[in-house]
Amino acid sequence: MSELILSPEEAAQEVKRLTMQLQQSGRQDLLLHALGVPLLEELRIEAAKGRLSRLVITEDYRFVLEDYHKEVELQPVHKAVYLLFLAHPEGIEFKRLAEYRDELLGYYMSTAKMMDKEKVIESVDHLTDPLDNAINEKCSRIKKVFLELMDEYSASYYIISSHTQKHVVGSSRIWYERLKVVRLPRELVVWKRG
């Protein structure tokens, strides 16, 4: 018996038909089993992508979710941390933040024009000290603000989150790079510069 080959579009229509049939029978349990939880999770994330807003960064460093008509209200230090991670889509390991000290200081000086320069420098020193918890506290605050503005799946693209990369050197040495990244597609980041 030859197998019928469907185009992706035809296969999608067939999946839709079978899904409706299972739903009408009240058998969401079978549908969930057929799809599997990992795929369901991927589908939820994919659905969130379609609802993502552009993030506009104004000349005076206001962060605006343009398509949601909402401002992301962050303190200057949080804005500086966020700008640093936006500028590095490849990710940054917290333990290597000292390598980005000058860049972070530049962002902080720009977002906190009225603050005492010595306090800004002291704050950046805390943020880049691998033995200090300041960076985790700032990232937690950023996450909280985004979660107040949107659902967790959409927020997962805007927050500073973990991404672990496995590296294999030769046949016996494996190491992991624990990067922190903002997963928001950069085409959705709009800088309004003067």
Image: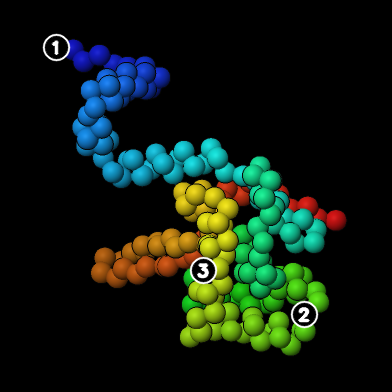
SS assignment at label 2: loop
Residue lying at the far right of the rendered structure: 194
Q: Residue 176, position in %: x, y?
A: 37, 68
- In primary-sequence order, the first of circles 3 and 1 is 1
The residue carrying mark 2 is 115
Mark 3 vs 1: CB contact within 8 A: no
The residue carrying mark 1 is 1
**Image point (61%, 59%), residue name:** 86
- In primary-sequence order, the first of circles 3 and 2 is 2
Q: Nearer the viewer, mark 3 or mark 1?
A: 3
**Image point (58%, 84%), residue name:** 126
Question: Quarter of the image holding residue 99?
Answer: bottom right
Q: Residue 56, position in %: x, y?
A: 71, 51
Q: Please, is residue 21 above or below residue 63 in the view?
A: above
Report the amino acid beneath label 2. Met
Relative to 11, 147 lies left or right:
right
Report the amino acid beneath label 3. Ser
Relative to 67, 28 lies left or right:
left
Q: Residue 78, position in %: x, y?
A: 63, 69
Mark 1 vs 2: CB contact within 8 A: no
The residue carrying mark 3 is 140
